[in-house]
Image: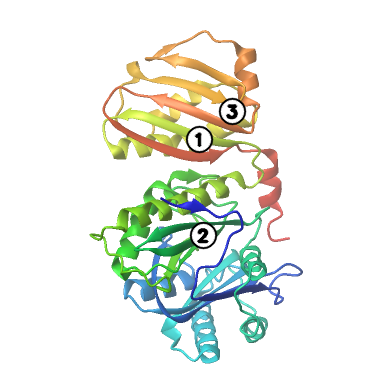
Amino acid sequence: MYKIIDTPTLPKGFKINGIACGLKKIKKDLSLIVSDNLCFSAGTYTTNKVKAAPVIWDKNLTDNKFSTKALIVNSGNANACTSTQGENDNQEIAKYLAKHLDCDEKNILICSTGVIGVPLEMDTYKKGIASIVKTIEVSDENLSNFSNAILTTDTFSKIVSVKTVIDNREVTITGIAKGSGMIHPNMATMLSFIFTDANIEQQALQNLLGNTIEDTYNMISIDGDTSTNDTVIALASGYANNDIISETSFYFKQFQKAFEFVNTFLAKEIVKDGEGASKFIQVDLTGAKTKKDAKNIARTVVSSNLVKCAFFGSDANWGRILCAMGYSDSYFDTNNVSISFESDKGTICVVDKGQPIKFDENLAKDILLEKTILVKIKLKDGDYSATAWGCDLSYDYVKINGDYRS
C-alpha cells in the first residue's frame, strides 16, 4: 500500500531550506518551505490555555481555511508569553515574508520553538528571511537543513518519507518533527510538519490530521508537560495530479494508512529522543470496556513518573503500573488484570488475572535492562485496545532542563 523511502525526499510542488540566521549562537535556527502555488493546509494545536503568538495566528488561518504559500519556523525562541509585542512581531514576520514571496500575509504559517517569555530579535529574524528566500530549492541537502534547523534539545533530526500510488499517480508523503522535552498526551513541545503532493480536499486533510493525532502524538509522554507551542501542520500541494481525494473516495483509506504511518513513526521518534531518556517504553493494552478507557489507562501508565523511574532502574515494580492504572479515572476489573514485560532478552509475566506471580528477579532485571521494552496489559472488560509510548526518567533530564536557558 505504501513504501518507506530510504532517503527522505521532498514531495513535488515545494522548495525548502534551513539556515543559521543568528537566533541561536551557532546552530541552524530558521527553516522555510514554500509551495510553488497556493496549497491546502490543515493544523492541530496545543490544548494549553497559554498559547504562543504563532499558534494563535496559525489556528485562525487553518480554522478559516486560508490557502498557504509558505511555512516558516524558527528555533531558539518560542515567542510565547510575549503579550501583544509577540503577536505584533508574529504578524510583522508574516507581512515581511509575504512581501518577499508576493502573496498575502494570510498565506503565511509561522511556528516557533525555544525559550518562553523572551521577545524575538526581529532585526535578526528579518535578515534571516531575506537570506533564506534566496536559497530555497529542491534538494536532499536542503530537506535535511530544514529538519535540523527546527531542533532545540533534540539529539537527532526526525524525518521520514513514504510513497504510494493513487489513481496511477505516485504520491509522496514526507514528515519532519522536533520534540525532546515537554512532551505529554494532548500534544507537547513538539512541532510536526507533514508535506504531500497528493491532491486532497482541504476538509478531508483537516479531518484526517485531527483523527490521526489521537492515536499518534496524543499517545506519547516524556515528562508530563504540555507546552505553549505544540503544532502539527499538513500541507498538500496537489502536484501529484491524482483525482482529488475526498473522505468518500476510493483511495482515501490507502492515503490514510500512509499518512498514519508517517505520524506514528514521528511520534515514536520523539519519544526515543526524550530528554535524558535511556529506554523506549511501549504499552500495549487489550480487553478494555471502551476505547476511551483503553487510551486513558495506557497513557496514564507511560505518563507516571514513578513508572518511568522504575524503568530507569530496571526495576520490575509492577505495583506502580497497577497504581497508575487505578488513578486513570477509567473502568477496569482489578481482579482480571494481567501484566507482563518483554524485550529482546525474553518475556516475563508478573501479574496474572489480578494475582501476583513469584517471578525470577534476575530474568526480569535482564529484560528491563534493554533499550526497548514492551509492557503488555491484558484486561477482560471488553474488546478495545490502545498503544502508548513513553520513556524512562533519568538524572540527565534534570541536568538538561536545569541548564536550558544557559
**Sequence order check, earlier mark of 3 and 2:** 2
Residue 102: which disc? none
Is 58 on the left or on the right of 81, as rendered? left
Query: Image point 59% across, 30% down: which residue?
Result: 311
Q: Which residue is mark 2?
A: 175
Query: Image point 44% across, 63% down: which residue?
Result: 170
Q: CA distance from mark 2 to mark 1?
A: 22 Å
**Sequence order check, earlier mark of 3 and 1:** 1
Residue type marked 3: Ala
Residue 369, horizontal then vertical, whole percent? 65, 26
Q: Which residue is mark 3?
A: 310
**Sequence order check, earlier mark of 2 and 1:** 2
- Choose mark 3 or mark 2, whichever is in front: 2
Regarding mark 1 in the picture, which secondary structure is present there?
strand
Q: Quadrant of the C terminus?
A: bottom right
- Choose mark 3 or mark 1, whichever is in front: 1
Q: Does 124 sit above or below residue 329?
A: below
Is 327 on the left or on the right of 7, as rendered? left
Query: Image point 51% across, 79% down: which residue?
Result: 90
Q: Which residue is mark 1?
A: 282
